[in-house]
Amino acid sequence: MFENVRKNFGFGCMRLPMNGDAVDYAEFNKMIDVFIENGFNYFDTAHGYIGGKSETAIRDCLAARYPRDKFVLTNKLTNFYFKTEEGVRPFFESQLKLCGVDYFDFYLMHAQSKENFAHFKRCRAYEQALEFKAEGKIKHFGISFHDTAEVLEEILREYPQIEAVQIQLNYVDYDDTAVQSKKCLQVCNKYGKPVIVMEPVKGGNLVKLPEEAKKFIDELNGGSAASYAIRFAAGCEGVFMTLSGMSNLEQMNDNVSFMRDFKPLDEREKRAVENVCKVFKSMNLIPCTACRYCTAGCPKKIFIPDLFACFNSKNVYHDWNADYYYNQVHTKNGGKASDCIKCGKCEAACPQHLPIRNLLKEVAKEFEK
């Protein structure tokens, strides 16, 4: 399909191993080596990942240590970093330098939605990306997408030059009416666009399962919770690449163990994940993936994903730890849920289309009694 891509499993570099505020280069180097030694070569980054540290970690740990033809690198054009048509090219050129490469194998218009698409059109971003391709600075042109299937179809009709589409897809979101994973996948297949999957484990939510859900995975007698989530996504029709945001060597070793000789889920495994879905739907949890897009523009500096994680943890485990983390870690210096001024910037940025302002009221009610 894409001659330079060696296998169907990619290293998502949004949640890299950290040593304090810095990327743990020693651990990242080991992870890259294991990944490549097992026959994989696809890496995915974006400028906003880890506050800009993902790209420079790619430069120092991947590009500086391996010949360029040994890895496939995807980067993205994000709306936060250009305001005008004239701003696109300088930002793109800066990304090449930050990553230490002369070209990107894939360059995606990032987090496309109806609103973002309008901004990209005003700035002729798609046209400029196609110019970068003509210049040999990108090999393949695509989009990452967070909106309804209807909006996706509009974009694919307007820009048939799109070669690949990155969508959120996992077994919990597959039939979700907000995320519309299945419908978006069907649109991609209709237009013959190969699919890159992001969030196959839903920001870790399908790894650390509630006990009620975990028992269905345990009954399969083998394989991690992550393995069933990633294999579900990778086995969907039209998917050519499934990304995993691995944060340590243990996760890397687990992931490559089952993706090295990939097999789709069998019928028994499919029934197990269907039962896990039923448990999640009964728990009324906040389906946040901790992408942190919402925090960038928050005027009150509320760490929204962390507060949602505390809320979910309390609902699942009913222990004091959630209160401790809420009060002593995430809001110790301000940024409580009750500080929200309801400006709505977070909701405009949320790929999950969550009613964040209302959810923060629930969080405040739970933790700020």
Image: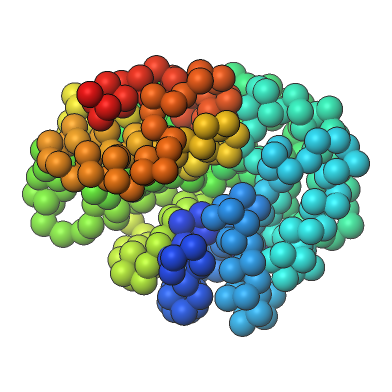
Total of numbered circles in the picture? 0
Q: Residue at image x 60%, y 34%?
A: 297
Toward which corner of the image does residue 146 lie, by quadrant? top right
Toward which corner of the image does residue 325 lie, by quadrant? top left
Q: Residue at image x 64%, y 44%?
A: 164
Along the line of sight, the residue nearer the viewer: 247 or 294: 294
- Quarter of the picture holding the C terminus: top left
Q: Position of residue 322 (x, y in %)?
A: 22, 41
- Quarter of the picture holding the N terminus: bottom right
Along the line of sight, the residue nearer the viewer: 37 or 26: 26
**Above or below 358: residue 185:** below
Q: Position of residue 99 (x, y in %)?
A: 69, 66
Q: Residue at image x 76%, y 28%?
A: 119
Q: Position of residue 353 (x, y in %)?
A: 48, 24
Toward which corner of the image does residue 190 lie, by quadrant? top right
Q: Residue at image x 52%, y 32%?
A: 300
Is 27 left or right of 206, judged from the image as shown?
right
Q: Is residue 153 visible?
A: no
**Above or below 58: residue 332:** above
Along the line of sight, the residue nearer the viewer: 321 or 80: 321
Q: Position of residue 264 (x, y in %)?
A: 33, 50
Is 309 left or right of 16, judged from the image as shown?
left
Is 160 left or right of 183, judged from the image as shown?
right
